[in-house]
Image (spheres, rainbow, N blue to C red):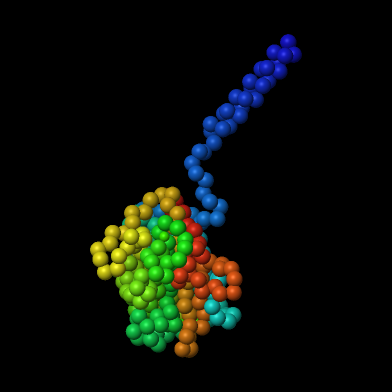
Amino acid sequence: MKTCNQFLYTIVICLIFITIYSCKDKSTPLDPNTTPLRFTENPPTIDGLASDACWTGIDWQPMNQKWIGPDYTPEDFTGKFKLRWTTDFIYIITEIRDDQLIDIYPDGLNRYWDDDCVEIFIDEDRSKGDHLKSYNAFAYHIGLDYKVADYGIDEMPHYYNDHVETIRTKNGDIYTWEMKMKVFDDTFVYDQPNTPVKLEEGKEIGFAIAYCDNDTSESRENFIGSIFIPGEDKNQGYKDAGVFGSFTLVK
Ligand SMILES: [Ca+2]
Ligand SMILES: [Ca+2]
Ligand SMILES: [Ca+2]
Ligand SMILES: [Ca+2]
């Protein structure tokens, strides 16, 4: 009888384990090091106003990592951002406090990083790696005039104005930049027809956002980003997609 009870006990334990295992969610778990980026069925109107429904109910994320320059005050610079996605676009809203906007290099392809600008880093397939001489990733500099500049594979600066649509509004020294970005993969060819990627749930992208703050100098005074970059030289994003953050598209 004791052997029979032990047998039944073993069967019950096995059934419990089988039940637990079969109920377990077998979908691939999210990487704990990747941030969820939430879908929206109601894309925002790009008007520089954060009043759209999709911008409520999600938290701001900070732009508080100093990549270049001395310490700064909250009045000099404070930045935060939110993201949403649809099949065709990634939507970005940033709220930037900046005590002085300047545009000292009127040629938008000349030292554009030394004028106030928002910089968006996007690596469509989160492949990481060098992107200075390739379209493995993009580092879009969005100037005060909304022109979008980055280096091309010829190591020359070019405009990619149709990649990011931007409208900025001002409220005192707080500037809200609202943006709609197409996402291109590494098959992109400059000056040719290119088809943006269709975005899907579960896709992982490399992404970071930063602000080049200049107020009174010949060169930018600070470069402040959303991602911690280790090491002495933190100005890596324009060439190395490996330093971008990781975001996973979720619904
Ligand atoms: Ca809006
Ligand atoms: Ca400033
Ligand atoms: Ca890539
Ligand atoms: Ca400034």
Picture coordinates of residue 221, whole percent (x, y)? 51, 83
Which residue is found at the position 50% from the left and 63% from the top?
A: 242
Query: Which of these two is toward me, 183 or 174?
Result: 183
Q: Quadrant of residue 181?
A: bottom left
Residue 128 visible to an observer of this rendering: yes
Query: Which of these two is toward me, 213 or 183?
Result: 183
- Of all residues, the one furthest to the top in this rendering is 1
Q: Is residue 109 above or below residue 162?
A: below
In the image: residue 210, left or right of residue 13: left
Picture coordinates of residue 225, whole percent (x, y)? 51, 71
In the image: residue 75, left or right of residue 142: right
Picture coordinates of residue 185, whole percent (x, y)? 36, 59
User: Image quadrant of ligand 3?
Assistant: bottom left
Which residue is found at the position 25% from the left and 63% from the top?
A: 193
Q: Quadrant of residue 39?
A: bottom left
Which residue is found at the position 47% from the left and 63% from the top?
A: 129
Query: Which of these two is toward me, 166 or 186?
Result: 186
Q: Is residue 185 above or below residue 224?
A: above
Q: Is residue 43 above or below residue 234?
A: above
